[in-house]
Each structure stands twice: as C-alpha cells, then as structure tokens.
Image: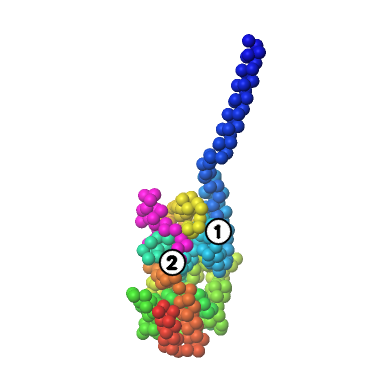
Amino acid sequence: MRGISRTVLIAIVVIVVIVAAIVGYLALTYYVAPPKAPKKLVIAARSGTYAEGLKIAAREFSKKYGIEVVVQDFGYAALHDKLVTEMMEKTGAFDVVMLDDPWLAEFADKGFLVDIGEMLKKKGIKVEELGFIPTCLEVCKYKGRLYALPYVGNVQLFAYRKDLFEKYGLPEPKTWEDVLRAAKIIMEKEGIYGYVIRGKKGNPVVTNFLPIFWAYGAKILDERGKPAVYSPEAVKALKVFIELKKYCPPGTENFGSAEVRAYLLGGKVAIVGEVWPAWVPDLENPEKSKVVGKVKIIPPPGARPMIGAWLLGIPVTSKNKDLALEFILFTLSKEMQKKIALEAGVPPTIADLYKDPDLVKKYPWYPVQLEALMTAKMRPRVPVWKKIEDILATYIHAALIGELSPEEALKKAQEELTKLLG
C-alpha cells in the first residue's frame, strides 16, 4: 500500500505540474489584461500667466484624481508651430491644447480638433448651463460646432488720465472724435503726448486699429464672406487713426506692447486706446507706475472692443480624450477659475466671477471688463485669417506712415483680399 500510495502521489504531482504549465502557457498566449487607466495628461500652453494658471489647475487635478498632468509651455509663435507639427505628424504628444481664438478656424477646418459639443452632449452636459460669457463661448465655434471651451476672458480695454481730463474739463470719451479732441487739448496744454498707437507692422497695428474700424461700422468681410474693407466707413476710421498719430510719440508706427506700456506707466501719455487686462494691475503698483490712482479703465469708445480669448481644445490625436475633457471641465469650473484668477491673475470666462466680491476687491476694473466682453467683437472665423491679417497690416501700416492715402490703402487691401478669397 505504501508503494502504491507513493506512486499515486508522484503521479498526481506530475499531473498538477503539467496542468499548471499548460494553463500558464494558454494564459500568456490568449489572455489580454484589461487596459490600465491613463496616469498622465500632457497640455500644450502659451507661456507666461496663462500657463501658470493651468499649472495651478494641474496640481489640483492631480491631487484629486491621482493623475499626473504635465503643462508644457511655449511662446506664442512656437505654440502655433508646435500644433501645426502635431497636426501633420500625428504623434499624440498632447491631450489638451491652448489656442488663441483666431486659430480655432484654422485647426478645426483641417480636422485637428475634437468636436467638444458632441462629447458634452453624450455626457448629458448642456454648455449653456456652464455660465460662460456668450462672446467667449462664441469664439469656440466653427461652422456651428463647438471645438473648444473658453479659458481666458481677454478683451481690449481703454485707458485715460482721469486727473488730466478733470483738470481741463473734458468729458469721458464716448466717441473717437472725443478722443481726438482730448488728445489735442492735453498735448497742447500739459506737454505730454495725447495718445499712443501700437503701430508695429503685423498683428499689433491691425489689433490696435480694429476698435476704431468697428466703431464706425466698417467690416472686414460682409455677410457673404466677401471682402468689405474698402467702404466709406472704413476710410473714415482710417483717417481718424492717422489723425491720432499727430498726438503720439515719435516712432509710434513701430511700437509694440512694451513701448505702449512704458509710456502709460511712466505717465508720458494721456490716452491709450488698446490696453489688455494683464497690463492693468501694474497701474496701481507704485514700484512700476508713476500714475497710481490717476488712470481710469473703460470699454473703448463705440463699445466694439476686440475679444482676444484663449481656448482649450482636444486634438484628435490625443489618446486620452475623455480624461482630457474632464480636465478641461475641472479647470473651467467656477471654483477653479476663481482660484486661478486670484493666484495667477488669469481673467475668467464665467460671467458671475466678474461680480465676485473677492475678485472685484483684487481687480476693481472687473465690472468694466465684463461690460467690454459682453459687447466684444471677434475677428472673422476663416481658416486663412493669418493671411487676411497680413494683408490688412501691410496697407494700414502704409497709410499710417504716409506712403498711401487711406483710400488707396483700403482699395489695395480690398483687391488683395478678393484675390485671396476668390
């Protein structure tokens, strides 16, 4: 019995070993483990304040969900180039991308961006109930579809020296004729420049001119998408722009943001027609400003400022689209936008936050900024906007430096735009 038991035992052990080996082989051959949840998101962002705001959201998101979020920041042109490269090479390098609002049409038209509207619909989320300022939401659309959500409530503002306006009995500017008159009087009587233009050829001169252009009822494209820049309204606006140059510092036709800010903060100019929210805090900083308590911020005369929102979208190459949307919604929630505004100074895109007591205490001009955002106008939603802007810049700048008359400049711009758009 002992011999038999021993033999049986050995046989059982051998069988068990063989069966285990076969099962292990089959498991390795045919069994596929369930995919693990992604542990990392990568964001492509504009460097500076806006990227810092996203880094705050990234830290909070990581703490809450245990997922690493990496924010890679790039300069303005470098970010655009990076997105173009990703669109062509399809590497899946980014899960969320930050976009300047005029880029939306370019990238959406080429199929690079996920339709976020459809994703929200599948989740049962109504975008209208998220509280975004209507103009901020509108710039996220292309051909009726929602390809991004608004992250930065950026808009043009207008600044004037309230102490000097009071000194000379001048009313707050309501029209660009009021601006011309005030610039002339203050320059003659006070000995400082009346106005300053951000006139550098390219995006600066176009952006600086647009609030005046739109205030006179001029259009870049008509309702059919045809060029409309050669019109009586546009000629009138360009003449005002050139007239304002008389009260500007020498070289204003080549000024960028740095020069305009220097004149404003240094107390060397009475009126600045294009001020961005990121500049405003320095006005009340005595270490940087010689005009503390002397400058008032209002919407541009004519109430047609240009919106300059920054957006968050999802590239079709992302491997983590659902998680990317969760991150975007987390970042753009009311609570997180408030935190980002307080800690990084990123202006929100939710209307209620511009009335929040904590934010208004820190940023007293927020109600004015909301007013400007509510009436803001966006640049035409066309994939070739950059080429349109380059053509406009060439001829607006030529008129500004006196190479062409306003009529000649706008007529030539109209001709080139017609060729471009067919």
Three-letter amino acid code of the residue under disc 2: Asp
Q: Nearer the viewer, mark 2 or mark 1?
A: 1
Seen at 42% across and 60% down, the residue is 147
Circle 1 residue: 91
* Depicted 145 relative to depicted 9: above or below: below
Image marks 2 and 1: residues in contact by CB distance under 8 Å? no
Please state the horizontal and vertical placement of residue 255, each as a whole percent of the image.
Answer: 55, 78
Residue farthest to the top, as pictured: 1
Give the spatial CA distance, label 2 vs label 1. Answer: 19 Å
Instruction: Work out whether residue 5 or residue 75 is closer to the camera in this orientation and state it.
Output: 5
Q: Residues within 10 Å of mark 2 (few under 14, many from 20)?
A: few
Asked if the stretch drawn in magenta spans residue 159, the answer is no
Magenta residue span: 109-135
Query: Quadrant of residue 158 in the image?
Result: bottom left
* Depicted 249 relative to depicted 322: above or below: below
* Quarter the C terminus occupies: bottom left
* Quarter the N terminus occupies: top right
- Residue 210 appears anywhere in the view: yes
Asked if the stretch drawn in magenta spans residue 113, the answer is yes
Q: Earlier in the sequence, mark 2 or mark 1?
A: 1
Residue 242's disc is none
Please state the horizontal and vertical placement of residue 368, each as a whole percent of the image.
Answer: 42, 65
Residue farthest to the left, as pictured: 223
Circle 2 residue: 109
* Depicted 356 relative to depicted 415: above or below: above
Three-letter amino acid code of the residue under disc 1: Thr
Please state the horizontal and vertical placement of residue 356, each as a whole percent of the image.
Answer: 43, 55
Seen at 42% across and 75% down, the residue is 211
- Residue 365 appears anywhere in the view: no
Please state the horizontal and vertical placement of residue 273, each as a whole percent of the image.
Answer: 47, 75
Instruction: Work out whether residue 422 or residue 364 is closer to the camera in this orientation and state it.
Output: 422
Seen at 58% across and 58% down, the residue is 72
